[in-house]
Amino acid sequence: MNSILQLKGSFEKHSGNSGGGQRNLPVGRYVETKHILGLIDELRTLQLYWSEHTLIKGALVSVYYTSVVAKSNRIKALLCKGSSDPNDSIRGAKFAGEAPHIQHVFTYYVGLDAIAETIARLAIISEIIERDYNGKICYAHIAALNKGQKQYKHHTRLAKTNFINAVVDAYYVQKFSIDFADLSEDGEAIITLYKTDVKTEDIFRTIGIDYLNAKQIDENTVLLRPDEIALLKENAPYLIAMKVRDMREIPVEDSVASDPRIVQIPTPKNEPIIGVIDTPFSENVYFKEWVIYESMLGEGIELEAHDYTHGTEVTSIIVDGPTINPALDDGCGRFRVKHFGVAKKGRFSSYSILRSIRKAVSQNRDIKVWNLSLGSVLPIKPNFISPEAAELDKIQSEFDVIFVIAGTNGDSAQKRIPIGAPADSLNSLVVNSVTLEGTPASYHRVGPVLSFFHKPDISYYGGDIGQPIHVCTPAGEGFVKGTSFSAPWIARKMAYLICTLGFSREVAKALIIDAAAGWNRKDDVSCSIGYGVVPRRIEDIVKTPDDEIRFVMTGTTDAYETYTYKIPVPIYSDKQPFYARATLCYFPKCMRDQGVDYTSTEMDIHFGRVKEKDGKATIASINSNSQGDEGGSHLYEPEARQLYRKWDNVKLISEELKDRAVPRKVYGAGMWGLSIKTKERLKEKNGRGLLFGVVITLKEMNGENRIDDFIKLCMMRGWIVNRVDIENQIDVYNRAEEEIEF
């Protein structure tokens, strides 16, 4: 087998221009005066409502767009004062409607003067459309204005650019409205308010809620009692952006225990440490020396024997899983664990768990991989991320760590139940369970998240009926099933890749997903098993068959485009006989208050042969991606998401293996290129300096081993090439961790 390669070298940067040209309506489409007048009527109704409801100083306006819209097609000349950018006023986003007619709904927070100015602006454009275009303006009319072929005569009333922008805005806006949250559920709930210019503390004081005693998750998110929710509903229902029930009850899989087996384990040395967030750990087990335990439950909480079971079982897999499950030996060895007990079995508050997780991670910066096998029985919401998942995404962004999360369990009698929090965390690696045959486990739950993002990410063996996972319980050997026990196997692999082999979390995540997907998967991702089932042996992730060349590259997005055109793919008989696959992973900043527009940064991957077009070098991407290319085909937002996973933080592009292979034509010198184009949702440059990891695989069509030729060509082009040899890397790790006595 061939070792995986690391290619190190410099990427080129190009500032570029991620924006489009002059705005216009889609070809063949138009805007009529009657639609403009309808929008004016809706705004006047909103104007009256907000003049009578003065708890906040401005107005919350929900804009229903005609479809899922790109950033370039959001409103630019409406709901703004003067030349201000309406995007700065967005306070949330969701989807409405049913497929295939899904539409974006954005909630804006604006001043009443902005509504008045919008009404006035729409009144002007309705007059112009009626007078100059007989009540209907179309693409050709605006094109003539953009090109100066038709004179615009209304500069004194409204600038031409503002006129065109307002017309295009009106085309994409179906209606203006006010949305009220569904508060039909009983019990305590986590409430998120829209961000306004009035502090949550002041709002609560006005309506009679004791803010000081409220359990605050962040500035605008609190855990409220039913009576407090009733007060909020009565006085300010329009302020509720999101409402979810507190996790309260986390299903913990029951195990079947038997008499203890005599298991011996050596004394720990310098093995990597994995963090575990779970129920308490029992020190009445054979591997207790391998675990540092810290209770975060607080004083005065009484524990029973069964409270220790789940956490101990999970940690037993991480420490010594291959010993008690020889058939699942992954080749990763043993790991030390720092175990944090944050919950009893059964009912508790997710509010307290979130505080504990942040404290544990912030105070243990040396731990890079964390296992979380706790999850809610409740299904996730379709239009926003759970507060638990959002906090985990925030922690991962702040502390350069990765969480491996169980995909949560359902009743085998029920089918296709959505996954529960926090398995909707986008930056985390979410793991579902499969049987030994690779089919979804009987208890599995399904994605996607926010109607778009692939969750779970991958799957692994978590036991099932007649196929239990062996664990160590406080009472002896146990036999279990559940996603709680598939996740720690992946945490082991992640820790091996990051801590032992020295990969970044971005590359490690990409390697896991890439290995699970293999060939012929593209973006045909299952909502049940994700990209696929991860191979059992670590060698199958960091080594390849002799006819494959796999290499990893890392970089940072310091400009619009980060690229290289210097990847030298070998040439034989004037052809390049290779299939290609590439997987990209990155950890974007996430914003829960933006609803379905949760990820702040888009990285668009282009990988393929470099060719000349109109005197410029371009990449003929293996997935025919032309987004951002000069002269490339225009795609509307739904198509860009479907075809190229726009705004997803995982991108996998792959060619199909065919029965009859046709070697590729060589362009120019035979170079291939990799380009990462970065786009932002908001003005903040959250993607600047963001790390990415790419895993690329080339498969020789004739079964030949070409890795030595590839290495030589790369070194001729200035790349530093490192073979990742497992045995050598383990030796390097051990030496680096040796204690030195003076």
Image: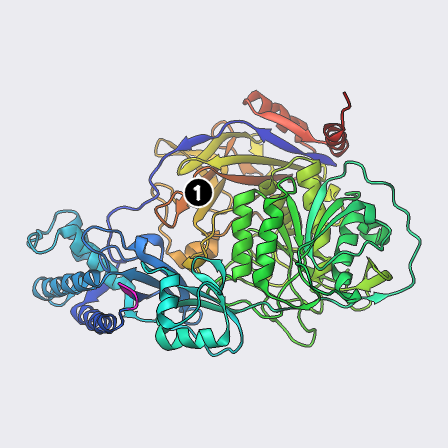
Snapshot quadrant of residue 136: bottom left
Query: Is residue 475 part of the magenta span, yes or no?
Result: no
The crowding category of the residue bearing disc 1, from other C-alpha atoms within 10 Å (few below 14, some 14 to 19, many at least 20), is many
Q: Is residue 251 visible?
A: no
At x 74% / y 43%, what residue is drawn?
A: 538
Q: Is 257 or 227 nearer to us in this picture?
A: 227
Tell me how many marks there are: 1
Q: Which quadrant does the N terminus fall into?
A: top right
Q: Position of residue 221 (x, y in %)?
A: 46, 62
Q: Position of residue 452 (x, y in %)?
A: 49, 60
Identify the colour scheme used: rainbow
Q: Position of residue 218 (x, y in %)?
A: 47, 57
Q: Kindly identify which residue carries mark 1.
A: 687
Q: What type of secondary structure mainly makes up the magenta span?
A: loop
Question: As displayed, is residue 131 above or below residue 588?
Answer: below
Q: What's under tag 1, amino acid-wise?
A: Gly
Tell whether 590 sits left or right of 536: left
Question: In the structure shown, which secondary structural element does the residue marked by tag 1 occupy?
Answer: loop
Q: Which quadrant does the C terminus fall into?
A: top right
Magenta extent: 55-59
